[in-house]
Amino acid sequence: MSREVWSAAQALAVAFTLVANLSRGFPLVSLAVAGLLYRAWTKAGRPRGIRNLAAEAEVE
């Protein structure tokens, strides 16, 4: 099998897996929750962690 045919077969397998998973609905809920968490994180100024949060609190 040539490299192009093999790559096309792999791309079809990935596409089929994505369609099958998205059709179940639960991955869409996970993506929505991840989007909401990302939005909250960016609104908070993208904090980097507890150590930095404590340092920032001391400065204020």
Image: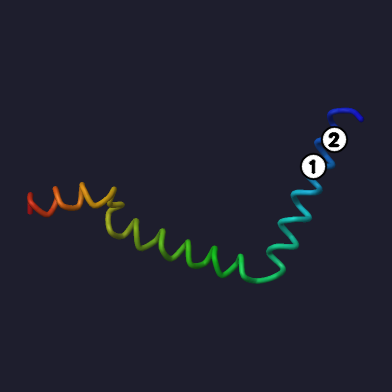
Residue contact at pointers 1 and 2, CB within 8 angstroms: yes
- In this view, the residue in front, 18 or 45, is 18
State the scheme by which the image is colored: rainbow
Indicate the position of residue 49 as horizontal and vertical percent values: 27, 50
Q: Is residue 28 left or right of residue 1?
A: left
Task: Check disc 1 and give the amino acid type.
Answer: Gln
The amino acid on which the numbered mark 2 sits, given as a three-letter code, is Trp
Outermost residue on the right side: it is 1
Query: Residue 2 or 44: which is nearer the viewer?
Result: 2
Crowd rating for badge 2 (residues with CA inside 10 Å; few <14, some 14–19, many 20+):
few
Cα distance between the residues tagged 1 and 2: 6 Å
Left or right position of 8 against 24: right
User: Where in the figure is residue 16, as x and y percent of width and height?
Assistant: 78, 55
| Residue 10 circle label | 1
Quadrant location of residue 9?
top right
Task: Give the residue number, with chain letter if any, for mark 2.
Answer: 6
Tell me the residue at 43%/66% (across/down).
Answer: 36
Q: In what element is the residue under mark 1?
A: helix
Q: Secondary structure at mark 2?
A: helix
Q: At which x and y percent is residue 26? A: 62, 70
Image point (7%, 54%), residue name: 60
> What is the quadrant of the N terminus in the image?
top right
Which disc number belongs to residue 25?
Answer: none
The image quadrant that residue 10 belongs to is: top right
Where is 11 relative to 41, above or below? above
Q: Residue at x 71, y 56 (%)?
A: 18
Is residue 26 placed above or below 15 in the rendered structure?
A: below
Horizontal and vertical percent for residue 22?
Answer: 68, 64
Label 1 packing within 10 angstroms: few (<14), some (14-19), many (20+): few
Left or right of residue 29, residue 44 in this image: left
